[in-house]
Structure formats: C-alpha cells, structure tokens
Amino acid sequence: MSDPTHDRPRTWEEGGPERLYVITSGRSVAAEDGPLDVVTLIVTKKDVPGSGMQPEHAAIIHICDYPLSVAEISAYLHLPVSAVTVLLADLLESGHVEARAPIPAASLPDVELLEAVMHGLQNL
Amino acid sequence: MDSRISEPVLGPRSEDTLPASVTTAVKVVIVGGFGVGKTTLVGAVSEIRPLTTEETMTQAGAGVDDIAGVERKTETTVAMDFGRITLSDELVLYLFGTPGQQRFWFLWNGLFEGALGAVVLIDTRRLEDSFDVMCRLEERGVPFVVAINAFPDAPSYPMSELREAMDIPDTVPLIDCDARSRGSSRDALLTLLRYLHTLTTTPPESR
Ligand SMILES: Nc1nc2c(ncn2[C@@H]2O[C@H](COP(=O)(O)OP(=O)(O)OP(=O)(O)O)[C@@H](O)[C@H]2O)c(=O)[nH]1
Ligand SMILES: [Mg+2]
C-alpha cells in the first residue's frame, strides 16, 4: 500500500551517501576512536523525554526498549553501522540511551567468560 | 521524491527481544569464500532470523585529493549477515558471517577487534580462497578453527592431506561441518571455544 499524499520521505531504505551525510550532519566517527563496537548493547533510558528529535534518533530510542546491539540497530534501521555509530554518540551524550560495553579487545579473553560461552552452547 | 508511505521503523518482534538483564555481548566471526555456507551456518544456530547490516565501501581514485571532494567516488554496498544466541540471562553471543575475499577486508576493521575468534569455513572445491584468509587472520592475531563444509559434489580428501595442502598448523583444529545442521554448526562453535580455552589456559612455551 502506498499513500502518495504522504509527504514525509521514507528514509530507511535510502542509504545513499548524500542521505547518510544529511542524517549524520556530515560527521563521522573514526572506528578506532569510537567506544562503540558492533556488539555494544544499547538500551533506552526510561526517564528521558524523546520529543522533538530527529526521526532517526527517535527510531533508535523506540526500538531500544530492550537491549539491542549496534549491529541490530543498523539492520532494523537499514543504516550502515558507521552512520548508526554517529547517531548513537549523540544519544549517549544527551543521556537518552546507555551503552553496555562488550568485552574489551584483549589478546586472549577471560577463562571464565569462555567457560560461560561454552556452557551456553552445550545447552543449546 | 519517494512517495511511499512512511512506516514506523520496525524493531525486533517481541519474541526476538533480549532479556533486559543482558550485560555482556561477545562475537565470533564466520569467514570464508563466496557461497561457502556462512549464512547457512549463522542461520542454523541463530535464535533470530539472520539480520543484515550494510556497509558502504568508498573507492577513491588513486591520487585523488579527498579533502577537495570534487572527484566523484564510487560507493559499493556490502552486506553482512549476523545472528544471535542468548547464552544466559547475562550473556549473548553474536555470529557474523563475512566474506573472505581480499576486496572485503575493509569490513574486518572493527569486526575482528574484540572478537573471541573465527571459524574459517572451507569448500574443498575452492581451497585457494581460504589460504589468504588464514594468513590474514594470523597476521591480525585472531585465533581460528577450520571447518570443512562438505558439499555433495566436492572432492573429499583425508584431513591430514588437507592440513598439509593448506599449511594449517597442527595445533589448529580442523573439523568437518554441515552448515545446514544446527548440531553440527554448534559443534563447530564449541570446537572454537575449546581451542580458545586451551590457548588461554596453556602457557605459550608449552604449546
Ligand atoms: N549440500 C550442502 N549445501 C550447502 C551447505 N551449506 C550451504 N549449502 C548451500 O550452499 C548455498 C550457499 O550457502 P550460503 O550460506 O548462502 O553461503 P554464503 O557463504 O553465505 O554465501 P555468500 O554470502 O554469497 O558468500 C546455499 O544454497 C546453501 O543452501 C552444506 O553443508 N551442504
Ligand atoms: Mg551469505
């Protein structure tokens, strides 16, 4: 179904470079500097009003009622991870969302963590 | 302009939400050549239908001044599939399937960083694809296991021959896998985890 009288552009499937430039106001976050990983979990903070914000920001707040990884946000919004990272930096700064950081990059992970992953897989 | 109706962004279905108590996310990367079964493996073990995230690859012409921004760059979109397994109330595992060909290596930045390790999926009809991948993972210090996804018309070699042909160190696990099977795919992940456990608990000099 389409509604030609509806004038708000459908943003989510138009991930062209110009469109992304507008969404992120031309900013970018260098991957190696940003604290966000593709599996950083993002959760909306309940007590912050989200009125009057950019639709992309509002969409993130809307879908992150329960924890979602940066990769999942990217998939649901049809935006590249690099664009989502910029939007999330805004929302983290304004206190609308919180990030649950993934395990930091270490040469070798913690034994207890590995055992927890193995245990979980064995129970599948 | 696009005149389609503006739908609200659809988030996860209610059955696809993570428990609010989840605090830790880890990732494992499934890497291999074209059509080797990466998406199939992710889909076989994932609790959610695999999702797709896209990244754009910008190719500026050699010697083009990027700052001037006059030169038109070519943008290629590359899709990456991923799935998810909730392991406990606090812990979730994400699986990313990523292409192994050299032209996609730009995707690896940020993907392998912080990853527990990788499963290199191999199709014995195209061994050469995987050779570069393994070298590259070694360079990056990413621990990996090698899983042979057996296709019916693929030649079958003894493991020892494959290991030698592909120059896989004796310490690196090499296993058979059916990416369509949940059990077999899970076992490939368990093989990786056991290997990582050994690496972590064994002092380097005694390996
Ligand atoms: N017989 C057999 N077929 C398989 C197996 N694994 C995958 N396939 C089939 O091989 C085809 C390619 O599998 P995909 O999972 O899409 O491979 P991929 O690595 O994600 O492919 P690209 O993302 O295109 O590089 C599909 O038609 C699968 O059904 C297997 O273990 N045995
Ligand atoms: Mg695929």
Image (tube, coloured by chain):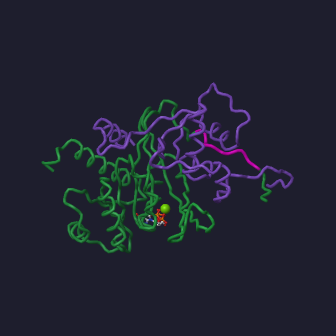
Chain colours: A purple, B green
Q: State left or right for residue B83 relative to residue A78.
A: left
Magenta span has B193?
no
Image point 30% across, 64% down: which residue?
Answer: B135
Residue A85's quadrant in the figure?
top right
Q: In the current view of this chain or complex, which residue is farthest to the right? A: A5
- Disc tally is 0
Question: In this view of the protein, which residue sits in the foreground, A57 or B46?
Answer: A57
Q: Is residue B102 above or below residue A51?
A: below
Q: State left or right for residue B196 relative to residue B19.
A: left
Where residue B182 appears, as percent x and y from the top left, is 41, 52
Question: In this view of the protein, which residue sits in the foreground, B96 or A92?
Answer: A92
Where residue B201 appears, as percent x and y from the top left, is 21, 41
Where residue A80 appears, as percent x and y from the top left, is 57, 53
Question: In this view of the protein, which residue sits in the foreground, A102 or A29?
Answer: A29
Q: Quadrant of the N terminus of chain B?
A: bottom right
Image point 76% across, 52% down: which residue?
Answer: A9
Magenta stretch mostly in which secondary structure?
A: loop
Residue B38's quadrant in the figure?
bottom left
Q: In the current view of this chain or complex, which residue is farthest to the top? A: A47
Q: Is residue B99 above or below residue A99?
A: below
Image point 33% across, 64% down: which residue?
Answer: B148
Q: In the current view of this chain or complex, which residue is farthest to the left? A: B206
Where residue A120 appears, as percent x and y from the top left, is 37, 39
Q: Is residue B5 above or below residue B131?
A: above
Q: Which residues are magenta?
A: B6-14
Q: Is residue B65 above or below residue B203?
A: below
